[in-house]
């Protein structure tokens, strides 16, 4: 996939210390293209590891620009509170919507709490790609949390998605193999999700797996 974004939305507010990659922008567009047929009017949606809200807000921008239905509620789950100010600025830039947008300052481990059980019709996530001990850390704790699984791990991310996704719901997520560290992320994910989520590779975004997840029945 090209590194040039052909679907510009708006200029996002982001921390200077860590700027989003095009992966997030392309993920939002790919999810939009997967769901153009879907009526989201009564839906509750979640962006996991949302940062300043770019994936979810880009998705909403594309839906609105093409006169498609918008969800009722959109939660943005992010552990780093520094992003909240940027989220609020981006929410203002996005403009008025019928959708209620909430910044949820929580770790994705919390998605396994009863308050989140089968809550979401749609989940999207561009999580960290790297593991502790499998790459060079930055002096910046903030930047490390953006790039590495630090507050939790892939297992709890996937279990949280499985727990909070409605039986009829769907999730879209980016996961990257790390062959230089001997990590086959798809094999690992399927092992974690055995009997709880069906995982399907539906594309590639700049060398990263674009996955569709549904509940197993």
Image: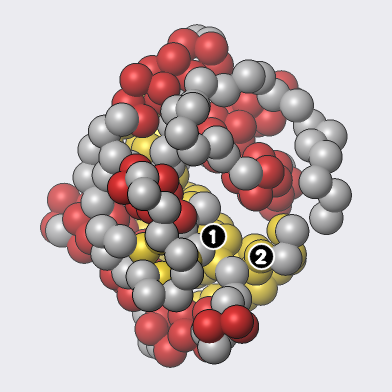
Residue at image coords 57%, 23%:
12
Task: Give the quadrant of residue 155.
Answer: bottom left
Label 2 to label 1, Cα distance in Å? 10 Å
- Residue sitting at the far left: 114
Q: Which mark is residue 173?
A: 1
Query: Which quadrant does the C terminus fall into?
Result: bottom left
Asked whether residue 98 is in view, the answer is no
Residue 73 to residue 146: above or below: above
Q: Which mark is residue 208?
A: 2
Label 1 crowd bin: few (<14), some (14–19), many (20+), radius 10 Å: many
- Choose mark 2 or mark 1, whichever is in front: 2
Q: Which mark is residue 211?
A: none
Q: Nearer the viewer, residue 135 or 57?
A: 135
Asked whether residue 155 is in view, the answer is yes
Label 2 crowd bin: few (<14), some (14–19), many (20+), radius 10 Å: some
Q: Could you tell me residue 182's position as x and y percent? A: 54, 88
Query: Which quadrant does the N terminus fall into?
Result: bottom right
């Amino acid at each position: 996939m090209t590194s040039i974004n052909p679907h510009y939305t708006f200029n996002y507010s982001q921390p200077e210390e860590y700027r989003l990659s095009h992966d997030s922008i392309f993920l939002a567009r790919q999810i939009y293209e997967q769901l153009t047929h879907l009526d989201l009017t009564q839906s509750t949606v979640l962006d996991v590891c949302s940062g300043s809200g770019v994936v979810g807000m880009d998705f909403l921008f594309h839906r609105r620009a093409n006169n498609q239905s918008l969800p009722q509620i959109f939660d943005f789950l992010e552990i780093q509170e520094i992003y909240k100010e940027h989220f609020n600025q981006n929410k203002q830039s996005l403009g008025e919507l019928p959708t209620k947008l909430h910044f949820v300052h929580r770790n994705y481990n919390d998605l396994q709490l009863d308050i989140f059980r089968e809550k979401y019709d749609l989940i999207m996530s561009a999580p960290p790609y790297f593991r502790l001990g499998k790459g060079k850390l930055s002096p910046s704790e903030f930047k490390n949390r953006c790039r590495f699984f630090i507050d939790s791990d892939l297992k709890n991310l996937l279990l949280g998605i499985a727990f909070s996704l409605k039986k009829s719901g769907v999730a879209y997520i980016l996961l990257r193999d790390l062959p230089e560290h001997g990590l086959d992320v798809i094999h690992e994910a399927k092992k974690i999700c055995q009997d709880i989520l069906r995982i399907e590779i539906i594309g590639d975004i700049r060398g990263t797996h674009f996955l569709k997840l549904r509940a197993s029945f």
